[in-house]
Structure formats: C-alpha cells, structure tokens
Amino acid sequence: MAAQTAKRVLVVAGLGNGSGTGASTARLFAKNGYNVALIARGGDSVNKLENEINSLGGEKAASFPVASYSHEDITAAWTSIHARFPKPEYAVRVALFNAAHGVWKPFLDITPEDVQTSVQVNIAAAFSFSRAAILAFKENDIEESNGKRGSLIFTGATASVRGNVTTSAFAAGKHGLRALSQSLAKEFGKANIHVSHSIIDGGILVDRTRERNPEWEHKEDVRLRPESIASSYLYLVNQDRSSWTWELDLRPAHEKW
C-alpha cells in the first residue's frame, strides 16, 4: 500500500486584528487545502480567525496565542504546533513571518525602549521563528511538484530598503529582517528550502486604514489588497525549483517610487 501523503501545514506569525496580510494568507491557504497554525499576540483576534476558518469546514485552523514574540514564547508555540499537527500525518511546508513593530518618530524622540522593541520583534523574533521553521522543513521529503522541503516567507516593507526622516528605528529592524532572509536563502537553498522576502511598498487596505482613508475602499490604484498579497505568497510557494524568487516587491499601480 502506498504511503499516505502528509497534510500540508502553513504556520503564520503576525495576524494583527485579522484584516491584514497574515490573516488573508491563512484564509487563502486554508481554501487551497492547507491546515493553518496561527501565532499572534493576544487571544481574541487569533481565536476569532481560527473559528472563522473552521466554520467553513474541516477544522483546518488552530490558534497559538503568545504573550510576546520572545524566543521562549515562539519556541513554545512551535512545540504546541508540532503536538497539534504531528508527523507523519502532517508536514509543515510553509512558514510566514508577518510580525512587525513600527516606530515612526524623529530620531531624537526615539527611546531605548523603541529601539529594543524594534530589534526584538523585527529581527530577534524572526531568528527564532526561522530556526523552528527550518528545523521542521529539514525533516520533510522533497515535494515532487515544486522540488521543495518547505517555503519560508518574510513580509517586508518600504523601510526594508530605504530609510526616511521618521523611520530610523523601524528601517533598522526591517533592514535586518531583509538581510536575514537573504542569508537564509543562500544557506538553505542547497537543502531545497525556499526562502523569500516580500517588500510591501505602499499602504494596505485594513480596518485601520479604511477608517483613516475611507476613499481607499474604491480606489484600487492607490493601496494594496491583503488578499492580493496573499495570492503572491501562494505563487511563491508554488514556484518550482528551476525558478525561485528571493525578493518580490509589491505596490499599487499609482504608488510613487
């Protein structure tokens, strides 16, 4: 009897209030047959998203709230994920690091706490998340359809490649995240692990920006849809081994750049 194919699992860290990129990616991948493990600070939004996805059938989603993006909390979440989605029935095939901490202040107003939090969430947490993801991928067989053991995606920003007058702390964190992603792509590509980084160059239509810019709802040329970003992430995951993207930059049609 042929061995049963393991069920694919997507792990997402960073969900906000459930209206942005992380949640849209979880919804899309669930529709495409993935089980989804949801990591986020605070239980309300992550549990709400779990219930929403599971209401569509299949009990595909499980939430793993964390108190912080510390190494200890991220590691504990991954331990719980492996218990909920154990091998050989399941295999973690995709991991998305979508967590971020933004600081927009003039340089002389930035506090040591601002710097520390930016470094912790944007860089140190990404190291912890990446370590757990890569260890999980290394246990996987190579998928015939795309030649991968797994895909690790990082959500970046304009500040990943360009600083500005109020983004010194944020840009430092995002530059560090980008450097990490490039280093991992070069180190683990030879192990058939696909690492990619996405520069989100523009405003995203989420609940907060809808309130601030109500006209965005009907002006698709000036903002990004989180569902479209999620579609780009699914495209990255489905790329075959002969043609992998490391960095993808996404912006609306009328974005100045």
Image (tube, rainbow, N blue to C red):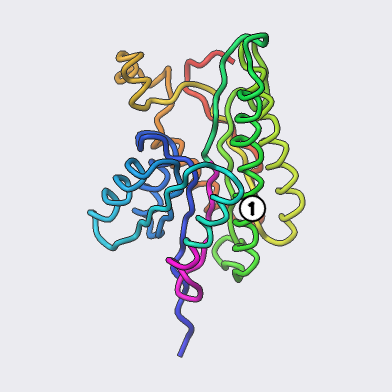
Magenta residue check for 105 = no
Mark 1 — residue?
194
Magenta segment range?
81-97
Instruction: Point out the image quarter for the N terminus.
Output: bottom left
Q: Quadrant of residue 168?
A: top right
**Which amino acid type corresponds to the residue marked 1 in the rendered image?**
His
Name the one closer to the observer, 175 or 72. 72
Secondary structure under tag 1 reads strand
Vertical relation: 117 (above or below) 195: above
What residue do we see at 26% from left, 48% from top? 52
What residue do we see at 53% from left, 58% from top? 78
Q: Residues within 10 Å of mark 1 (few under 14, many from 20)?
A: many
Magenta residue check for 92 = yes
Image location of residue 126, percent across then percent down:
62, 43
Name the one closer to the observer, 242 or 29. 29
Instruction: Point out the image quarter for the C terminus.
Output: top right
Image location of residue 190, percent across then percent down:
75, 59
